[in-house]
């Protein structure tokens, strides 16, 4: 199989890249080269900006692919460009969408690919919906061989998967735990969530590559394991070897007082319970199973980050914000109890 990945070194795509190389795939990565150290031996590297459409067309002039997958398309203009570039160049085009496109709030907590697409809280999700609509129109009208993949919360060894963290990642939350400082959990922590290790995601994704039954279909790829946010934070604290000191804060309050886009990522995503039905994926990829249990995966991530200081990114602004939010909650409680 000859495949081209636009991106290929991110959280979701890096595990797919590794597993494909182990299978002997002829794999091309096209990206700007900002993470050259993450490009493994064995890939054919096309270093350029995908937005330089004319130059990309020259690079691939003599190439045809079994699969092209774009991991960095976020708005309709991106997939319109992809259609122009790859319409006659690939047997399958895979667009990486997002499970955040599903109806928010849900009318049924069980999510299938037939769940309506609607997210009034998050422009990111609405852009992904628009991308899906454009590509499916090209499939219906022009026969463009598209497959849409919807990841949910996928993680790897480089970042601890959490609900509320700063712009520099989740290390500052882990540092607060190590310092026995209180950490914020949105809501009461009892809403259900699904996290998927990128190695498991890769198995499902590779099973869709070159799969004629996946053409014209949208498929989400997630673990079948569902846990509460309280359990997630307990797992992280346990992996760090500390006792969790949690403060629960309403999601709407967090979104209202944060400079970050918590309205989108929290109210439009993580604040709601989700349970994914992966029946469609398992029909298309018989034998698929996510085998990395969350507590096992997070322990691997914690070990990796603790031994790789470059992923321990400090975020003093977020740390101060946490202290301010927790202080405000404490002050409100004290005032009401007077």
Image (cartoon, grey):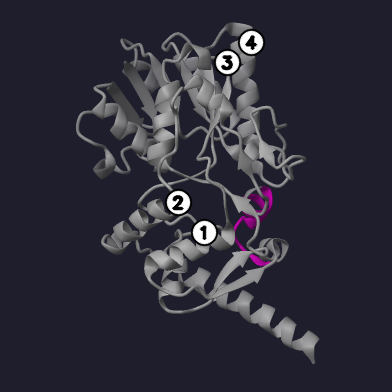
Query: Of helix, strand and loop, which one carries label 2?
Result: helix
Q: Nearer the viewer, mark 3 or mark 1?
A: 1
Query: Of helix, strand and loop, which one carries label 1?
Result: helix
Whichever of callouts 3 and 2 sits on the residue coming sooner in the sequence is: 3
Q: How many marks?
A: 4
> Which corner quadrant of the image does residue 39 belong to?
top left
Quadrant placement of the C terminus = bottom right
Query: Of helix, strand and loop, which one carries label 3?
Result: loop
Q: Which residues are magenta?
A: 257-268
User: Rounded to the nearest whole Å, what is the CA distance between mark 3 and mark 4?
Assistant: 8 Å
Q: Position of residue 206 (x, y in %)?
A: 40, 25
- Considering every residue shown, the one lying at the far left of the view is 41
Tell me whether the residue at label 1 lies in contact with that at label 2, contact meaning CB atoms closer than 8 angstroms.
yes
Whichever of callouts 4 and 1 sits on the residue coming sooner in the sequence is: 4
Residue 299 visible in rendering: yes
Other residues around mark 1 within 10 Å, as few (<14) / some (14–19) / many (≥20):
many
Q: Residue at x 77, y 40 (%)?
A: 107
Tell me whether the residue at label 3 lies in contact with that at label 4, contact meaning CB atoms closer than 8 angstroms.
no
Verify whether residue 186 appears in magenta. no
Q: Position of residue 10 (x, y in %)?
A: 39, 41
Image position of 10 with respect to 232: above or below: above
* Residue marked by disc 1: 232
* Residue marked by disc 2: 294
User: Rounded to the nearest whole Å, what is the CA distance between mark 4 and mark 1?
Assistant: 41 Å
* Residue marked by disc 4: 140
User: Rounded to the nearest whole Å, what is the CA distance between mark 3 and mark 2?
Assistant: 32 Å
- Considering every residue shown, the one lying at the far front of the view is 287
* Residue marked by disc 3: 216
Q: Residue at x 38, y 22 (%)?
A: 56
Q: Residue at x 65, y 31 (%)?
A: 112
């Amino acid at each position: 199989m000859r495949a081209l990945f636009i991106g290929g070194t991110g959280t979701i795509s890096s595990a797919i890249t590794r597993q494909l190389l182990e299978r002997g795939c002829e794999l091309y990565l096209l990206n700007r080269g900002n993470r050259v150290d993450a490009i493994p031996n064995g890939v054919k590297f096309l270093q350029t900006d995908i937005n330089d459409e004319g130059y990309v067309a020259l690079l691939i002039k003599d190439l045809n692919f079994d699969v092209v997958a774009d991991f960095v398309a976020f708005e309709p203009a991106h997939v319109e460009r992809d259609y122009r570039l790859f319409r006659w160049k690939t047997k399958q085009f895979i667009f990486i969408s997002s499970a955040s496109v599903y109806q928010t709030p849900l009318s049924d907590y069980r999510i299938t690919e037939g769940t309506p697409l609607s997210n009034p809280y998050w422009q990111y999700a609405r852009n992904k919906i628009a991308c899906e609509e454009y590509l499916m129109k090209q499939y219906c009208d022009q026969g463009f061989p598209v497959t849409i993949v919807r990841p949910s919360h996928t993680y790897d060894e480089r970042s601890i998967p959490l609900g509320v963290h700063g712009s520099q990642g989740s290390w500052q939350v882990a540092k607060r735990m190590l310092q026995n400082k209180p950490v914020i959990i949105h809501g009461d922590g009892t809403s259900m969530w699904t996290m998927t290790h990128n190695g498991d995601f890769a198995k499902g994704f590779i099973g869709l590559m070159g799969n004629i039954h996946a053409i014209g279909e949208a498929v989400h790829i997630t673990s079948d394991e569902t846990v509460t946010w309280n359990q997630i934070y307990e797992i992280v604290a346990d992996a760090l070897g500390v006792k969790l000191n949690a403060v629960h804060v309403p999601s709407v309050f967090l979104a209202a007082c944060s400079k970050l886009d918590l309205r989108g990522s929290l109210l439009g995503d993580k604040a709601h319970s989700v349970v994914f039905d992966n029946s469609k994926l398992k029909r298309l990829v018989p034998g698929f199973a996510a085998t990395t249990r969350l507590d096992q995966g997070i322990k691997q991530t914690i070990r990796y980050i603790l031994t790789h200081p470059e992923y321990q990114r400090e975020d003093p602004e977020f740390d101060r914000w946490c202290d301010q939010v927790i202080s405000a909650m404490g002050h409100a409680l004290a005032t009401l109890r007077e």
